[in-house]
Image (cartoon, rainbow, N blue to C red):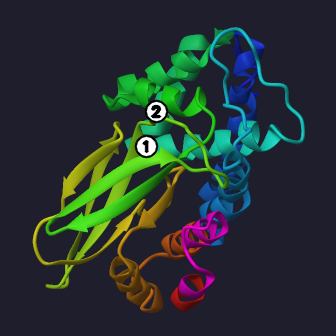
């Protein structure tokens, strides 16, 4: 009614604007009226997980092909258009805030009602309301195939983050995404804080301050990427917070899901995976 009829994609290459919003709001509307059903948790299991699995193959397609060509929807591309598309909408909503996201969508619909629009029109509407670099960030996600693995190493009071494309088979990719990174840091004095930043290059560092005993990258699991902790001790500290349920269910699921993907790729042993469980 809104995404497709009120505002129609200006070209078939933007078909994902219809289908991804159908995926996103199929969960979002029900979550609004029945919050006790934890629909966004189910969204991660049913949509994001499927998209990550398909997008980890070397021969995958972007959501939107730069230029005039459009993605043909079939059994191999549907998880990208529907599942990944919905997941990156969830990602940008998490980055700019759900209220700002909804207000940006209202602005987009009002500005282009009974007319045609492109992906850039959507990003510009969201950017105007949030004053964040949404266009640059989201074009890196829709115009490239795949997604990154964010590897984390702790060096005293800093976290060193690097990104590279995640595939199950070796690849020679030099792709870079603009990755929204949210880190939950736990301190030995009993408090915690959340740090949000953008990883927009191959590597960067984050200052987490002194007396940090644990940290969870991609806190809330809104980011469409996987995380690898280089030090086993950092992962085991998070394991303690899994047992105590200090971490929410989506983050407990995210740790297990990422670790299993690393097992499948050969980066982590089955023994370490089972020990963590």
Residue 152, position as x, y percentages in the image: 35, 61
- What secondary structure predominates along the stretch shown in magenta? helix
Residue 5 within the magenta-colored segment of the rendering = no
Dividing the picture into quarters, in which one does residue 267 lie?
Answer: bottom right
Indicate whether 251 appears above or below 98.
Answer: below
Q: Count neighbours of disc 2 (C-alpha within 10 A) and say few if under 14, some if 14 to 19, many if 20 or more.
A: some
Residue 148, position as x, y percentages in the image: 51, 47
- In the rendered structure, the answer to whether residue 243 lies left or right of residue 169 reads left
Which residues lie in the magenta part?
Answer: 259-272
Q: Which mark is residue 173?
A: none
Residue with the mark numbered 2: 103
Q: Secondary structure at mark 1?
A: helix
Question: Image point 66% across, 24% down: which residue?
Answer: 64
Dividing the picture into quarters, in which one does residue 214 lie?
Answer: bottom left
Indicate whether 230 appears above or below 129.
Answer: below
Residue with the mark numbered 1: 99
Indicate whether 69 appears above or below 177.
Answer: above
Q: Secondary structure at mark 2?
A: helix
Residue 264 within the magenta-colored segment of the rendering = yes
| Residue in the foreground of this view, choosing between 208 and 18 | 208
Residue 251, position as x, y percentages in the image: 49, 71
Marks 1 & 2, CB-CB < 8 Å contact: yes
- In the rendered structure, the answer to whether residue 209 lies left or right of residue 232 reads left
């Amino acid at each position: 009614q809104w995404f497709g009829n009120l505002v129609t994609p200006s070209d078939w290459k933007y078909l994902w604007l219809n289908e991804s919003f159908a995926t996103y709001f199929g969960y979002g509307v029900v979550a609004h009226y029945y919050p006790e059903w934890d629909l966004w948790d189910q969204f991660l299991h049913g949509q994001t997980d499927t998209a990550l699995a398909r997008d980890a193959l070397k021969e995958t397609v972007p959501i939107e092909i730069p230029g005039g060509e459009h993605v043909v929807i079939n059994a191999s591309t549907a998880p990208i258009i529907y599942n990944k598309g919905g997941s990156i909408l969830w990602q940008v909503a998490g980055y700019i805030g759900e209220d700002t996201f909804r207000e940006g969508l209202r602005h987009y619909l009002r500005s282009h009602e009974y007319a045609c629009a492109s992906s850039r029109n959507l990003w510009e509407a969201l950017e105007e309301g949030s004053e964040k670099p949404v266009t640059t960030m989201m074009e890196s996600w829709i115009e490239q195939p795949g997604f990154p693995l964010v590897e984390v190493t702790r060096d005293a009071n800093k976290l060193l983050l690097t990104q590279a494309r995640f595939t199950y088979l070796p690849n020679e990719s030099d792709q870079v995404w603009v990755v929204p990174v949210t880190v939950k840091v736990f301190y030995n004095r009993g408090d915690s804080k959340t740090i949000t930043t953008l990883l927009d290059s191959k590597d960067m560092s984050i200052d987490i301050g002194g007396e940090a005993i644990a940290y969870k990258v991609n806190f809330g699991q809104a980011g469409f990427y996987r995380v690898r902790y280089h030090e086993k001790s950092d992962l085991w500290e998070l394991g303690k917070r899994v047992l105590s349920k200090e971490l929410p269910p989506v983050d407990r699921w995210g740790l297990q899901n990422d670790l299993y993907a690393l097992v499948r790729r050969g980066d982590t042993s089955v023994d370490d995976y089972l020990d963590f469980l």
